[in-house]
Amino acid sequence: MTATAPVAERPAKEPKQPKRQQRFNEGTGRLAAMLLSPTMLVLGLVVLFPIISALRESLYTSGTKLDENGFIVKGSTFVGLQNYTDIFKGEIGDRFWNAFYNTTFFTVICVVLETVLGVVMALIMHKAFKGRGVVRASILVPWAIPTVISALLWKWIFQADGIANDLLGTQILWSTEGWQSKMSVILADTWKTAPFIGLLVLAGLQTIPAEVYEAAKVDGASVWKTFTRITLPLVKPALLVAVLFRILDTLRIFDLPFVLVGPHKDSVETLSMLAYDEAFNTRYGPAAAYATVLFVYVAVVAYAFVKILGADVIGEARAKKPGGGGKGRRKKREIEEAPGVAMGAAAGGGGV
Amino acid sequence: MATATAAPREDLAKVRAAEVGPLRRWAPLIGVVLIVLYCLAPFYWMVVSAFRRPADQFSNKVIPAPFSIQNFKDVFSGSNGFGRGLLNSLIVAGTVTILTLVIGLIAAYTLARLDFKFKNVVLAIIITTSMFPGISLVVPLLKLFVDIKWINTYQAMIVPSLSFALPLAVWNLTAFFRQMPQELEQAAMVDGCTPAQAFRKVIIPLAAPGVFTTAIITFIAAWNEFLIALSMTNKKSIQTANVIISQFTGTTGRDQPFGSQMAAGVVVTIPLVIAVLLFQRRIVAGLTAGGVK
Amino acid sequence: MRFERSHTRKAAVVAVASSLVLLASACGGGDDGGSSNGGGSAGALEGRGPITLASGKDTSGNLQNQLNAWNASHPNEKVELKELPEDADAQRQQMVQNAQANSDAYSVLVMDVVWTSEFAANQWITQIPEDKVPDLGKLIPATVETAKYRDKLYGVPITSDGGLLYYRKDLLTKAGITDAPKTWADMVAACQKVQALPEAKGMGCYSGQFEKYEGLTVNFAEAVNSAGGSIVDKDGKPSVNTPEAKAGLDELVNGFKTGAIPKAAITYKEEESRRAFQEGKLVFLRNWPYVYAKAAATDGTSKVAGKFGVAPLPGKDGPGVSSLGGHDYAIASSAKNKATAIDFINFMASEARQKANIEKTSQAPTWASLYDDAALNKQFPYLAPLKASIEKAQPRPRVVKYGDVTAAIQQAAYDALNGKVAPDKALADLQTKLQSLITQ
């Protein structure tokens, strides 16, 4: 709770002095705090609070001892960082590093594939041609199917006597340990979430004015060059946000490997599954420790991603604004100031 | 100004298509076909499986023979409460989407336009909440909701979904708003708009693609949410469609009700896609017809 | 500036409203630590009034009929059905979560037999004095054992389940074999004769359930028990590193090696293996009683309708030993109206209700004499072998950390079946693992 307190406090005081006139810059901090408070409150209630309680939980263990009647001794014991150090020891450590590797592997492969595919989808959806609506609808379909159901669908497809083996004329046992189970997860995940990137990139594409392309054409730029020099830089903010959130999601991947291949399979066990497994066996302390380790890992990856690729995603306010955004970043500015960017935004129409 | 750029672009596409050789001309088409196949083939399998007789579930025939709507009948059979579940899903996902947009738009606009300290810290905190494994949030949340008597209420599903959706909404919309020149609002205000009007009448319409995309993604994410909805409700009348689907059973102990699950999947997916398409068409039409000036 | 003010007022209202929510929740949600549960002590079955029954939906929808029968005669103590997901793990998860949150949403829990120890040790369910269950003596003793923890009763078994051997009677007859095999050696010999027949070309010999899930524990336990071994001995100590246990595991490992068990069986759960049998790909199948109705279906979905028979499981030197399945009804510690709950459980355990249940759902009863009912035997021809199977059945290890124990068993068995780890090493590792899990 403490984390949100400063934000919560501020607006609460505000009504006492509503009439006071302020200069823009003086008031912005307060105004911003007020406008952001609904967001911070919701996040505080439902996410930060559980996270903090999980952090606390990770320092305790409970339910490890039986009394003479065979009942589990109640209450929890403070164990400091032991839940964390245990993660890296011996056999449990091997399992952890295997899950760590799998998680990373899935994230790298899936996100790369999804990005490429998503951008292609966005380019296609953006093109004007007959039947565009149908194409857009078909691309939306995988994303719209509930994850629980799509996992079942893929499980069915990859059964020993399922349609995948039927079409391939093979007898691959997809859910057994090995490359094939990894492949099936990657295939299903890519199928399901490439449209997500596609949608967000499409929205970005729709903000690029046609004039920019015309100018490139006049200069005789090749298709590839136009794409890499104009399209890509201009959709970069949207693309980076999409990829960033895909990274966050894939690092926490759970449903697909769990339903499609099954729990306790070395080939596809991920960090989320480890946290789940501990919680399933009611070891909430270690479960919280796993969750926290995963959390830290995700945060580090996200931070690195933003630092290396996407400084401009959360970049400071536009540099030309008086008084603000002094620390503004370089690359982005010329893009932001490209003429007519906003006009193109309206022209593109809906997001699908 | 919306119409101004839309028309030339389509012309441009035609011109370009006419200029290039056959390979160039057909390559994109082949690409389109491949992508559509890739997206639809598994879905087709879902539809086909839904239209088989329950007894033929395991058939690998490409066309269901004999064709049957038994699975759909099973889905909607009286005791399931699936219709009510759909309504509940709609209530939850609809509310989440509206709230996410309202709250998210305000936050994103603030982050994109106002200068204040700790802006990056705020953005970082917001995205940080998307980094914790969702399955680890359930137990603490359940304890909280039991304490504040939220079990079996809509808000117990809406508020968590809202908080799962907000980070992406805020980040995405912030990126969008930032792409728009600030001169727009300034010009509007010179014309006599209040800042709020400038935001509502100029910025939001211009950001339509971003807002709309955010709305779709939020709605679908909320529509698909399962774990929270399952844990926070135990009354049939308030459970969402996904929870109801998880309760489907086969005809005897251990057989999986794959057919009815797939039928339910079709039922929850297709209206979603159609609604998005119609919605989108209207938005585009509204933008081009009305003019956003 | 108007800019600021117009925003300010609206935003302030929103902010105040939302911070009130936060405050309220901060007060209400202050106590997030510990997992103190009330109840759990013996005998405190008091209070009357409405209760709930937390259960996965039963397939026939008959459960609601049973509840209606109760509700009609107990208007002030009605039972409301709380349907849980179909998946057993998800059911357990919901029950555990509700116990953790000390919620009274679920009064009576329909529990898989293997959960008893864990739920009892955590005091999530209430001990039931045996004199409160007058019909206990009429139930099959093996099933009652599954509801006990440290010799105290925590639930009442309402349905049971045992493994059966399904075999292709037509092919066996053609190959000149009259009786179902009693031992593994008989079974393999019978297979070889059958597979020599032209119509049995390419058929697999035998399958159970060998995917890495609870079913593998069931099949592994059956193999070990049928060879005279045990996973956990009578005193609750791990005993899996023995020649008997190895003989059992070897039987399965060799089955995969020689091809007697088809390769794909490593992905089989109940349904996959049933389909393989129904499609005529297997001579022998180990599975539960539910398969009978499906395989006997004459609507064209089963290729083996009228061609198969049912027998007790074979073993190493004689009849085999099945693992025990089924469900017990238990009372949640955090529940209200426990007096009503125990009455309701007794009602569901009664002969009349159990008979009504098997007639509609074909779920195996726990009421012993129902197995000798002529009409039922006619309706369910597998009852006789099933009774033999259940009476001799061994429960899976009854341990507090069942989740970890079954995961360890699955790991060992799966690795051995895959040829990744030699059987004796797999068992030695498993023994070590189990010792650390079952020390208390």
Image: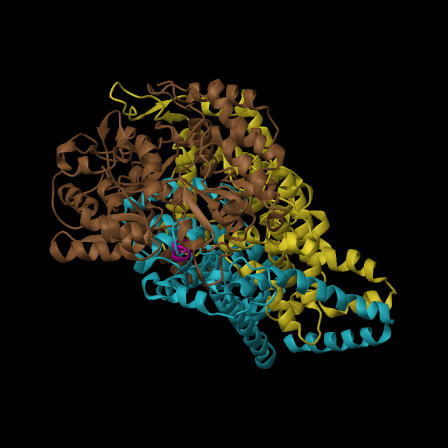
Chain colours: A yellow, B cyan, C brown
Q: Which residues are magenta?
A: B243-250
Query: Which residue sits at x=87%, y=71%?
Result: B21
Q: Quadrant of the C terminus of chain C?
A: top left
Up the image or down, C249 lies above or below A227; here it is above
Could you say which quadrant of the image residue A302 lies in? top right
Q: Is residue A303 above or below residue B243?
A: above
Residue at image position (82%, 62%) is A223
Q: Is residue C73 left or right of residue B38?
A: left
Asked if residue B63 lies left or right of residue A27, the reply is right
Q: Is residue C334 magenta?
A: no
Residue lying farthest to the bottom in this orientation: B289
Q: Position of residue C196 (x, y in %)?
A: 62, 43
Q: Is residue A246 left or right of residue C123?
A: right
Horizontal and vertical percent position of residue A97:
59, 29
**What is the residue that sits farthest to the front in this orientation?**
C176
Residue A29 in percent (x, y) is at: 48, 49
Q: Quadrant of residue A200?
A: bottom right
Camera-side residue: C281 or C266? Answer: C281
Give the tally of numbered discs. Answer: 0
Is any part of residue B292 visible from this angle?
no
Return the x and y of residue B116 as percentages of the image width and height: 53, 48
Q: Left or right: where does residue B85 sit relative to residue B118? A: left
Query: Viewer-proximal residue, A78 or C315?
Result: C315
